C-alpha cells in the first residue's frame, strides 16, 4: 500500500516540479530588447541556412527568359518551337478576378502564375496566395510530327478576353496558323471559386505526333499560411478521387511518397485551410502522383511545406485534344465545397478515417456550423461541448456506478488479498467468484470509456481542420485553429516548443482532478501489471506537453468537457447514487444462485486446472 502512495506522490511531485520550472523560466526570461535581438539573430541564421540548403527536385523548372528586344534570340526561339512560332512572343499577363479570387494568367505558357484569395489573410496579415513567385507550373509535354519535343511552358499564347453574360472568358491560343491552335480557355463566374477550364486543339492532327504520349504536368509547392509550419504541414496533403469516387491521399509526413493511379477524376493540392484543385470531366486513364515533405523542424522563416507533382497522359480524339476541366482555388471549407456536390469536392476535406470521419462529417461539422452561425466561435465550442457531455451523461453514469460497486466491494477484496497473499492464482480465482456473485464486472468501467473513444478521436480531427475556426479569437487566443500563447520562451524545449499555451494547462489541471475522482480511490494494483495509477496520472502531463502546439479550440474543448464531467460525476455521487443501497443490492445479488456463462465457466475451469497442477507439483 505504501508503494502505491509513493507512486502518486512522485507523480504529483513531478507535476509540481514541472510547474516550478516553467515559473522559473518565466521569472528569468530576458528583457524585451534581449528577446528581440535574439529573435532577429535567429531569423537571420534561419534565413541564411534556408538559402544555403540545397532542395533538389523541389524547384519548379523555369524556361529561360527570352529577350524580346533581341531579334536573334527571337529568331532562335521560333526556330526551336517550329510551327508554333506563328504566335508573336509577348511577355504580358491577363487578370481574371471576382469578389473572391484574383488570378493572373501569363502569355508565356498560358498558365496561372498568381492565385490570391481576396478575403483571407495569413497569420501575419498578408493576403493568402496559393500561387505566387513561381511556386507552380502547369504545362503539356508533347512531340510534333517533325520530331520536336515541346513544353507549353516555353510557348507564347495569344490572349483574348471577352465576356459571356456576367462571366469573364479568357482564350489563350498558341497558334500554328490563324485557324490552327492549341487553346486554354478560362471562364470565371461572379462570386465563385470554381473556374471553368478547357484544353482543346484545332487543326493540329497533322502537327502533333499521335504516336508519342502527350503528358499533362502540374507542379505546386505548398505555401505556408499559418503560425506554425510544422503543425500546418500535418494537414497539408495531396488528395485525389479515382476509380469512381474512391478517395485516397499521399503521406503527410514521409520524405517522399508517390503513387500511380487509374481513372483519376480530380487532384487536390491541399495547403491546410486552402486548396488548389484540378477537376477533369474525362478522368485521366493513369496519373503519376508524388508528394515530397519539405518540413523537418519548426521554423519561423521557411516558406514551403510540400512539393506536389502530378503527371497524366492525355488522349487524342480524331487527332485532336478536347478536355473540359475546372480549377478551384479557395478555402478547404465544407460550406464552400458542399456547393459543388456534382464534383464531390467536399470529399477532399480531411474529416478523419472510418467511423470517426462519419461522426465528424455528419454530426460535429453541421452542429458547429449551425452554432457558430449564431454565436462567437469560442462560445459555440462551449455550447457544443455541453451538448456532447449531456448526450454522453448516461455513459458517465454507468461508469461511475461501476466504480461505486467496486468501492463497496473493496473491503472484501482486501480480505481475499490478505487471505491468499501467497497464492496469486487462488486470489484471482476468489476475486472473480466474488465479482460474479455480486454482479459486478471490473470491465464495465472500461466499456463506457471505449464508447467515448470515437467521439474523442473525431474531435481530435475536427478542431485542427475546421475552417470555421480559422482566425477566430476567444479570450486570450487570437486563433482557435492554432495554439494560444501567454508567454514566448527565449529557447525551445524539445517536444514542448518555444512558447507556453494556457488552454492545455487548464485542460491538464481539469484532467488531473478528473483522474483523482475516477481512479485515485478505486484502482487496485495487480501483481505483475504496470502501475495503472502512474499511467493514468501521466495523461495530464501528456496533455500539457503535446497539446502545447495544437489548436487552442481542441484544448478548450477538453478543458470544458472535463469540467462538465466532474460536475456531472459530483451530482451523480451526491444526489443519485446511494452507497448503502448499492451495498444492500450487492448482498442480495450474492444470495442468489449465479448462472455462469460459457466464458466464465471456461475461465473457472482453466484456473482450477492450473491450481490443481500447482498443488500436484508441490507434492
Image (spheres, rainbow, N blue to C red):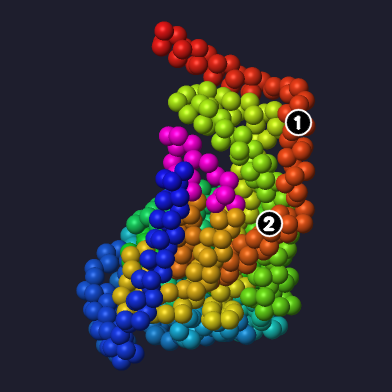
Label 2 neighbour load within 10 Å: few <14, some 14-19, many 20+: many
- Give the CA separation, mark 2 to mark 1: 25 Å
State which region is magenta: 518-533
Which SS class for mark 2?
helix
Q: Residue at x 61, y 62 (%)?
A: 562
Q: Residue at x 41, y 51 (%)?
A: 6
Left or right relative to 404: residue 236: left
Label 1 neighbour load within 10 Å: few <14, some 14-19, many 20+: some
Left or right relative to 115: residue 29: left
Can you tell which mark lies on residue 104? none
Seen from the viewer's position, the closer of residues 469 and 456 is: 456
Is residue 528 rendered magenta in the image?
yes
* Residue 425 visible in the snapshot: yes
Seen from the viewer's position, the closer of residues 602 and 268 is: 602
Left or right relative to 479: residue 149: left
Frontmost of labels 2 and 1 is 1
Q: Position of residue 427 (x, y in %)?
A: 53, 27
Q: Contact, CB < 8 Å: mark 2 with mark 1?
A: no
Q: Residue at x 69, y 84 (%)?
A: 166
Q: Which residue is mark 1?
A: 589
Is residue 495 rendered magenta in the image?
no
Q: Which residue is mark 2?
A: 569
- Label the magenta part by its dominant secondary structure: loop
Which SS class for mark 1?
helix
Task: Please report whichever mark, 2 or 1, sits nearer to the chain's N-terminal start.
Answer: 2
Left or right relative to 542: residue 46: left
Q: Position of residue 567 (x, y in %)?
A: 68, 62
Amino acid at each position: 500500500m505504501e508503494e502505491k502512495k509513493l507512486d502518486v506522490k512522485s507523480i504529483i511531485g513531478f507535476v509540481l516540479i514541472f510547474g516550478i520550472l516553467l515559473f522559473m523560466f518565466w521569472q528569468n526570461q530576458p528583457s524585451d530588447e534581449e528577446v528581440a535581438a535574439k529573435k532577429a539573430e535567429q531569423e537571420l541564421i534561419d534565413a541564411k541556412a534556408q538559402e544555403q540548403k540545397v532542395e533538389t527536385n523541389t524547384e519548379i523548372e523555369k524556361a529561360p527568359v527570352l529577350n524580346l528586344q533581341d531579334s536573334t534570340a527571337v529568331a532562335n526561339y521560333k526556330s526551336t518551337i517550329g510551327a508554333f512560332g506563328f504566335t508573336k512572343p509577348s511577355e504580358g499577363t491577363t487578370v481574371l478576378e471576382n469578389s473572391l479570387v484574383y488570378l493572373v494568367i501569363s502569355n508565356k505558357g498560358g498558365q496561372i502564375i498568381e492565385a490570391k484569395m481576396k478575403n483571407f489573410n495569413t497569420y501575419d496579415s498578408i493576403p493568402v496566395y496559393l500561387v505566387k513567385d513561381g511556386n507552380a507550373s502547369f504545362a503539356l509535354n508533347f512531340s510534333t510530327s517533325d520530331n520536336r519535343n515541346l513544353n507549353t511552358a516555353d510557348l507564347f499564347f495569344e490572349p483574348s478576353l471577352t465576356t459571356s453574360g456576367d462571366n469573364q472568358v479568357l482564350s489563350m491560343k498558341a497558334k500554328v496558323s490563324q485557324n490552327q491552335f492549341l487553346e486554354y480557355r478560362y471562364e470565371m463566374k461572379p462570386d465563385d471559386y470554381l473556374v471553368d477550364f478547357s484544353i482543346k486543339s484545332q487543326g493540329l492532327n497533322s502537327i502533333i505526333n499521335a504516336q508519342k504520349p502527350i503528358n499533362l504536368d502540374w507542379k505546386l509547392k505548398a505555401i505556408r499560411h499559418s503560425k506554425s509550419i510544422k503543425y500546418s504541414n500535418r494537414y497539408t496533403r495531396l488528395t485525389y478521387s479515382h476509380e469512381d469516387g474512391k478517395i485516397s491521399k499521399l503521406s503527410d509526413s514521409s520524405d517522399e511518397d508517390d503513387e500511380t493511379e487509374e481513372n483519376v477524376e480530380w487532384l487536390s493540392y491541399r495547403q491546410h485551410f486552402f486548396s488548389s484543385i484540378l477537376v477533369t470531366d474525362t478522368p485521366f486513364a493513369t496519373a503519376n502522383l508524388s508528394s515530397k515533405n519539405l518540413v523537418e523542424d519548426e521554423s519561423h522563416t521557411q516558406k514551403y511545406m510540400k512539393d506536389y507533382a502530378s503527371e497524366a497522359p492525355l488522349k487524342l480524339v480524331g487527332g485532336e485534344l478536347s478536355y473540359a476541366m475546372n480549377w478551384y482555388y479557395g478555402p478547404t471549407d465544407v460550406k464552400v465545397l458542399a456547393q459543388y456536390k456534382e464534383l464531390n469536392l467536399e470529399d477532399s476535406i480531411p474529416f478523419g478515417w472510418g467511423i470517426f470521419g462519419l461522426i465528424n462529417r455528419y454530426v460535429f461539422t453541421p452542429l458547429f456550423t449551425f452554432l457558430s452561425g449564431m454565436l462567437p466561435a469560442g462560445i459555440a465550442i462551449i455550447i457544443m461541448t455541453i451538448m456532447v457531455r449531456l448526450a454522453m451523461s448516461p455513459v458517465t453514469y454507468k461508469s461511475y456506478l461501476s466504480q461505486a460497486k467496486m468501492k463497496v466491494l473493496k473491503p472484501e477484496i482486501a480480505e481475499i488479498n490478505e487471505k491468499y497473499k501467497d497464492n496469486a492464482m487462488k486470489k484471482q480465482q476468489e476475486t472473480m467468484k466474488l465479482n460474479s456473485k455480486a454482479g459486478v464486472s471490473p470491465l464495465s468501467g472500461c466499456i463506457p470509456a471505449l464508447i467515448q473513444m470515437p467521439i474523442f478521436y473525431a474531435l481530435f480531427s475536427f478542431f485542427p481542420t475546421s475552417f470555421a475556426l480559422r482566425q477566430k479569437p476567444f479570450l486570450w487566443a487570437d486563433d482557435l485553429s492554432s495554439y494560444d500563447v501567454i508567454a514566448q520562451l527565449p529557447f525551445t524545449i524539445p517536444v514542448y516548443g518555444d512558447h507556453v499555451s494556457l488552454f492545455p494547462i487548464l485542460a491538464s489541471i481539469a484532467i488531473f482532478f478528473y483522474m483523482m475522482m475516477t481512479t485515485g480511490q478505486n484502482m487496485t494494483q495487480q501483481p505483475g501489471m504496470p502501475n495503472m495509477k502512474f499511467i493514468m496520472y501521466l495523461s495530464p502531463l501528456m496533455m500539457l506537453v503535446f497539446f502545447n502546439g495544437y489548436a487552442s479550440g481542441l484544448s478548450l474543448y477538453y478543458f470544458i468537457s472535463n469540467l462538465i464531467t466532474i460536475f456531472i460525476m459530483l451530482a451523480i455521487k451526491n444526489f443519485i447514487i446511494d452507497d448503502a443501497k448499492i451495498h444492500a443490492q450487492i448482498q442480495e445479488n450474492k444470495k442468489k444462485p449465479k448462472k455462469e456463462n460459457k466464458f466464465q465457466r471456461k475461465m473457472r475451469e482453466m484456473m482450477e486446472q492450473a491450481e490443481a497442477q500447482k498443488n500436484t507439483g508441490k507434492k
